[in-house]
Image (spheres, grey):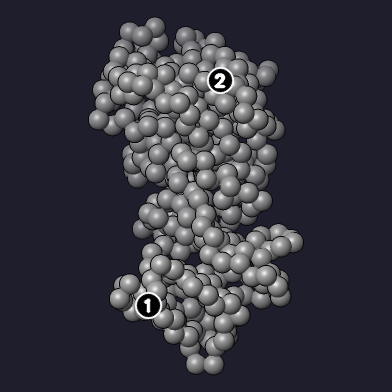
């Protein structure tokens, strides 16, 4: 354990959004027997960003079935959705089943949830519930994942003009849903959207790049991350995104520490919201550490978040837990059965000096980077960087 002393898909439209509840037929009224709106109230100028789509979007009995199922659903913490500020985004028949996609508002923590409901005639059940840690996310999004058996489709907002799949070809979109997309289980898959011109986006956008972190990422973790400069796909190449989501590695390793102290499935504080990229820290040409050390960086609930990645010349990459310290990062990473401490700091500071504990010899030391074996005792490392003495402590 290391101690120290000392998020949005699409375009954020908060300033341009006008509230107004959307319902069947565009009347702006919610039927009295249907407390859950059809469509979502978000507007971009006069454009309803999330109108109701699907062949059953005008079916009152289907609406009630969705409302009943959503009203009975609870988050893993036991919190209840607020129906009147949620909305049915898609409702219809697909692949021999009834499918509903709902943007659910859970007011306790200001959370946005994407619910997927499936049924075959005996009622609807919430089969997938994912939470995004940025409360306004589902309101401002333009592409939402829909998982069906072993396939993935995407539900598009009314702003989307074109969706490009991982093969670089446009996907066919029917009534807001794309054709199935080849998203692998534990591998980051790039997709992109082109947005049409709207009041808030007078010129639209040419190509908003996104990453689907894999079809096997378990809820409540939300699997789609903006990748605006395209660096995320490179950073996650050859990395197991299911492993990255675990408690001991990068994306899943910072516990959100809920105030109530209860134990339940929840989104880690280190879960990525956007801006994933990597920086090369240094390379080793020979020996047991032959390979490349990278720093993985992304934006999470905790702000800018980091992890170390070791990419061996041959074999599987190793990834550390997350770290949120900017001046000097310290990571514990297991390589070939040995745990190492990877220290990284500003390599542009010519006057930086590393002070190691007595008796500790680095297996790698170069500008801005040091790698030392982890000891069976507490270790304190000091680096004078940018005129300040930074201290990092690694517990036994």
Q: Residue at x 65, y 45 (%)?
A: 186
Instruction: Work out which residue is located at the far bottom of the displayed protein and give it.
Output: 359
User: According to the image, label 2 marks what residue?
Assistant: 177
Pinpoint residue 132: horizontal percent, then vertical percent.
44, 41
* Quarter location, residue 308: bottom right
Instruction: Work out which residue is located at the far right of the displayed protein and give it.
Output: 314
Classed neighbour count for the residue bearing mark 2: other residues with Cα under 10 Å, few (<14), some (14–19), many (≥20):
many
Label 1 residue SS: loop
* Along the viewing direction, whichever of 159 and 290 lies nearer the viewer: 290
Classed neighbour count for the residue bearing mark 1: other residues with Cα under 10 Å, few (<14), some (14–19), many (≥20):
few
Query: Sequence-wise, which precedes: disc 1 or disc 2?
Result: 2
Pinpoint residue 150: horizontal percent, then vertical percent.
70, 33
Q: Residue at x 28, y 32 (%)?
A: 14
Total count of labels? 2
Instruction: Work out which residue is located at the far front of the displayed protein and give it.
Output: 350
Q: Nearer the viewer, mark 1 or mark 2?
A: 1
* Along the viewing direction, whichever of 78 and 94 lies nearer the viewer: 94
Give the number of the disc on residue 40.
Answer: none
Is residue 154 shown to the viewer in this render? yes
Are the residues at dot 1 and dot 2 in contact (C-beta closer than 8 Å)? no
Q: Is residue 153 above or below residue 322?
A: above
Label 2 residue SS: strand
Whether residue 17 sits left or right of residue 268 in the image: it is left
* Along the viewing direction, whichever of 270 and 169 lies nearer the viewer: 169
Pinpoint residue 130: horizontal percent, then vertical percent.
50, 39
Give the number of the disc on residue 351.
Answer: 1
Whether residue 18 sits left or right of residue 256 in the image: it is left
* Quarter location, residue 387: bottom left
Is residue 32 shown to the viewer in this render? no
Cα separation between marks 1 and 2: 56 Å
* Along the viewing direction, whichever of 126 and 175 lies nearer the viewer: 175
Q: Is residue 280 above or below residue 191?
A: below
């Amino acid at each position: 354990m290391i101690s120290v002393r000392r998020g949005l898909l699409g375009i954020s439209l908060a300033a341009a959004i006008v509230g107004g509840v959307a319902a069947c037929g565009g009347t702006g009224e919610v039927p009295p027997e249907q407390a859950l709106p059809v469509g979502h109230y978000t507007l971009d100028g006069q454009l309803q960003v999330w109108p109701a789509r699907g062949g059953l979007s005008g079916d009152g009995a289907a609406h009630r079935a969705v409302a009943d199922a959503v009203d009975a659903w609870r988050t893993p913490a036991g919190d209840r959705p607020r129906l009147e500020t949620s909305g049915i985004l898609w409702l219809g028949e697909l692949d021999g089943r009834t499918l509903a996609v709902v943007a659910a508002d859970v007011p306790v923590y200001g959370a946005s949830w994407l619910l997927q409901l499936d049924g075959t005639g005996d009622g609807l059940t919430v089969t997938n519930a994912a939470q995004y840690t940025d409360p306004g996310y589902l309101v401002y999004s333009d592409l939402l994942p829909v998982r069906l058996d072993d396939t993935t489709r995407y539900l598009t907002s009314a702003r989307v003009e074109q969706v490009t799949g991982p093969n670089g070809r446009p996907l066919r979109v029917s009534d807001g849903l794309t054709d199935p997309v080849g998203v692998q289980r534990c591998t980051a898959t790039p997709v992109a959207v082109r947005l049409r011109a709207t009041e808030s986006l007078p010129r639209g956008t040419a190509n908003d790049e996104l990453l689907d972190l894999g079809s096997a990422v378990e809820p409540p973790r939300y699997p789609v991350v903006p990748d605006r400069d395209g660096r995320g796909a490179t950073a996650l190449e050859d990395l197991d995104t299911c492993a990255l989501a675990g408690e001991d590695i990068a994306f899943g390793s910072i516990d959100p520490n809920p105030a109530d102290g209860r134990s339940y499935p929840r989104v880690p504080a280190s879960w990525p919201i956007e801006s994933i990229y990597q920086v090369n820290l240094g390379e080793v040409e020979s020996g047991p550490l032959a390979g490349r050390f990278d720093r993985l960086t992304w934006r999470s609930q905790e702000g800018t978040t980091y992890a170390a990645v070791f990419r061996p010349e041959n074999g599987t990459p190793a990834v550390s837990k997350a770290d949120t310290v900017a001046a000097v990062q310290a990571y514990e990473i297991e390589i070939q059965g040995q745990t190492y401490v990877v220290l990284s700091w500003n390599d542009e500071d010519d006057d930086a000096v590393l002070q190691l504990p007595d008796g500790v010899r680095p297996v790698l030391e170069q500008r801005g980077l040091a790698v030392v074996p982890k000891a069976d005792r507490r270790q304190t490392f000091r680096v004078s960087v940018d005129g300040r003495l930074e201290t990092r402590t690694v517990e036994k």
